[in-house]
Image (cartoon, rainbow, N blue to C red):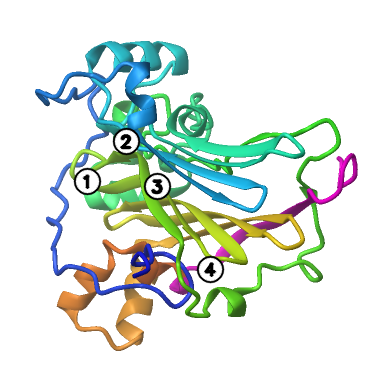
Amino acid sequence: MSLPPPTGFPGRSPPVPTTTFPSPPSVISPPPSTTVRPTSRTPFPDPANTPQATRTHQQGPFTISATKLPILKAGPIDSLTSRLGIPIPEMIFGDNVLSITHAPSGWSIFFSAEPALDLVDKTGASMLRVAYASSWSATREKTSAGITEVVKPFDWSYTTSYRGSEHPSPSHKLHKADPKKTQIPLELLKRRDPILFADEVVLYESELDDNGISMLSVKVRVMEQRMLLLCRFFMRLDNVLVRVRDTRVYVEFGTETVLREYTAREDSFENVKRNLYMSGLTPDAITVAFRDANQLANLIPVVEHEIEEVQLAGAGGGSSS
């Protein structure tokens, strides 16, 4: 029997639990500067336990691996905070990794939390108050000047444009392609081919001080002839803004072709809510939908799109930058 497909892929989204989220308080403040540390009694695993926490699948010349370890403890959190220079999200899975490796060429790509968080703005130039100060002011019943005073000098929504960490080989590297000529074949991915390997890895999550959600996760499914990886950043700031940033890595095993597509979507909370209402959802269903990026993504306009490719077939051949 094949594994059940993960969510977030074409034509394969299961129902979402009917969970509600609380209404935002009258005054919203950014997350506290002190990091919330988990209190799990499970000992922090040392690197020697990583093989036992890793699932690996071989398909042709490609190896797909998923490592899932517990949430970081105090010591690793302090080290990571020091390296990044910003407070990290409440839930940080710093040892989780999902990777794709092409052994013949030496090319690989992996997804993990630290490089993703390293792309979070640390200067304050991209903080939401810049573009949405009036919305925050109305929500908090404070002035824009008051917002400036309370927001920390980093993007505490943890918005990232992370597309994975590529390890190119000497002659193989992802390079930009023409989106009109090169596209991920969605129709092939909608086929009910048996799934040989599937997994999901959460990298980090924050509840934005109980005012929404910010989450980065990676899902993968592997069929006999092709595979698709989805790295999704989903951010909802209640009554203000919704963002979905997707990186899809598609591999065609027969031709040893890899495509990486990045799509960023963004809209105001009110516009997304209006679109959900216009789609025929009831108020309760709209509340549920706001917790599910799968329901929201196609209702949010695209603000950035790019596709890259690399041909890995052939000794010493392929695409180079």
**Can you identify the residue that label 1 sits on?**
140
Q: Earlier in the sequence, mark 2 or mark 4?
A: 2
How many residues crowd mark 2 within 10 Å: few (<14), some (14–19), many (20+)?
A: many
Q: Earlier in the sequence, mark 1 or mark 4?
A: 1
Where disc 4 sits, the SS reads: loop
Q: Nearer the viewer, mark 1 or mark 4?
A: 4
Q: Which residues are magenta?
A: 298-321
Give yes or no for contact between labels 2 and 4 (Cβ–Cβ under 8 Å): no
- Residue, x 81% and y 40% (percent of image)? 172
**Can you identify the residue that label 2 sits on?**
147
The mark total stands at 4
Give yes or no for contact between labels 2 and 1 (Cβ–Cβ under 8 Å): yes
- Structural distance between the alpha carbons of marks 2 and 1: 9 Å
Query: Would you say residue 304 sits in the magenta stretch?
Result: yes
- Structural distance between the alpha carbons of marks 2 and 4: 27 Å
Q: Looking at the rendering, in which quadrant would you find the N terminus?
A: bottom left
**Can you identify the residue that label 3 sits on?**
217
**Can you identify the residue that label 4 sits on?**
301
Q: Earlier in the sequence, mark 3 or mark 1?
A: 1
Residue 214: image location, x then y, percent: 34, 45
- Structural distance between the alpha carbons of marks 3 and 1: 30 Å
- Residue, x 37% and y 50% (percent of image)? 200
